[in-house]
């Protein structure tokens, strides 16, 4: 795994990890709420890295990226972050993968920048909007009940909520190493960032009608964070999309069933390459 920091004047630096041949088909991964680029470690250490250029960035406010006071409610800011990484690494045509809040950032990017640089999109545990009646209706009640405790500045209060959040990210129990790793990802995200990311109102549902690139939707049947109906609703907006439902997974199919996910992502990217 190679890593670097994309430095910017007046904007937060963005930490990036990369694996695989630089001339392989590029895949840019966006992690979810309170996580980091290492969420994709199973993909980075799989056969995908043998022949694909895998790139994962820490979202602003997360991991080793900058943690500014603002920009979390601004689609332009999220789009700028993604573009900065694509520019720095010379990604002219890439597959954009977004998990959970990362899928919202992916849709922010597409809504602001369009699809000129994007060959295809994989939305995992899709969040098509936030703060609206429709999109809020897809959120699991146990996840919703974590607020406002998870944004608390009291360490004990927020730690309990973060622990519960991590448990909700999978079906069943996490391996202890995965659990503490994911807790660590969340612990470095300041409470003000956790709060600001939820304090926005936007829906990309209508925008989906005009999306003109191939889309693969990946969703676990037992997702306790975002109901699988969210993926089905997005699928109905995109008649040519490929919806892949994981009957044995929760919110993190790429972690819970990495072999199947890797196979399907490889096939999706390969299909785009053949079409080119």
Image: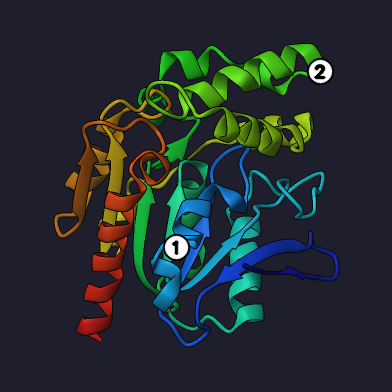
Q: Is residue 151 left or right of residue 66?
A: left
- Mark 2 vs 1, N-terminal side: 1
In this rendering, is residue 18 above or below 148?
below
Q: Which residue is mark 2?
A: 155
Name the residue at 43% across, 75% down. 50
Q: How many marks?
A: 2
Name the residue at 60% across, 51% down. 38
Residue 151 at x, y percent in the picture: 71, 23
* Residue 50 seen by the camera: yes
* Residue 80 seen by the camera: no
Residue 178 at x, y percent in the picture: 56, 35
Tag 1 secondary structure: helix
Q: Residue furthest left?
A: 239
The image quadrant that residue 27 belongs to is: bottom left
Q: Specify the label residue 35 is tagged with.
A: none
Residue 133 at x, y percent in the picture: 40, 25
Tag 2 secondary structure: helix
**Location of the C terminus (image quadrant):** bottom left
Q: Which residue is mark 1?
A: 110
The image quadrant that residue 209 belongs to is: bottom left
Q: Nearer the viewer, mark 2 or mark 1?
A: 2
Alpha-carbon neighbours of circle 1 within 10 Å: few (<14), some, or many (≥20)? many
Kindly report the distance in space between the C-alpha atoms of the residues bearing marks 2 and 1.
Answer: 36 Å
In this rendering, is residue 122 above or below 94?
above
**Location of the N terminus (image quadrant):** bottom right
Name the residue at 51% across, 42% down. 101
Q: Nearer the viewer, residue 202 or 126?
A: 126
Residue 179 at x, y percent in the picture: 58, 29
Q: Nearer the viewer, residue 165 or 48?
A: 48
Alpha-carbon neighbours of circle 2 within 10 Å: few (<14), some, or many (≥20)? few
């Amino acid at each position: 795994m190679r890593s670097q920091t994309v430095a910017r004047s007046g904007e937060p630096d963005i930490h990036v990890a990369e694996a695989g041949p630089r001339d392989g088909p590029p895949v840019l991964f966006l992690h979810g709420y309170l996580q980091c680029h290492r969420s994709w470690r199973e993909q980075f250490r799989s056969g995908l890295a043998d022949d694909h250029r895998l790139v994962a960035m820490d979202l602003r406010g997360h991991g080793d990226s900058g943690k500014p006071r603002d920009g979390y409610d601004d689609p332009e800011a999220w789009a700028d972050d993604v573009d900065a990484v694509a520019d720095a690494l010379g990604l002219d045509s890439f597959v954009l993968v977004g998990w959970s809040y990362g899928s919202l950032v992916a849709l922010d990017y597409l809504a602001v920048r369009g699809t000129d640089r994007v060959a295809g999109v994989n939305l995992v545990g899709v969040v098509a909007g936030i703060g609206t009646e429709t999109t809020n209706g897809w959120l699991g009640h146990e996840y919703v009940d974590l607020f406002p405790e998870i944004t608390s500045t009291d360490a004990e209060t927020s730690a309990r909520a973060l622990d519960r959040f991590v448990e909700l990210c999978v079906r069943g129990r996490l391996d202890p190493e995965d659990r503490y790793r994911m807790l660590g990802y969340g612990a470095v995200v300041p409470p003000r960032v956790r709060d600001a990311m939820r304090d926005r109102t936007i829906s990309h549902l209508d925008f989906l009608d005009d999306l003109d690139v191939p889309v693969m939707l990946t969703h676990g049947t037992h997702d306790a964070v975002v109901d699988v109906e969210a993926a089905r609703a997005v699928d109905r907006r995109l008649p040519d999309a490929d919806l892949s439902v994981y009957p044995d997974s929760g919110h993190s199919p790429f972690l819970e069933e990495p072999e199947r996910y890797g196979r399907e992502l490889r096939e999706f990217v390969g299909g785009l390459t053949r079409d080119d």
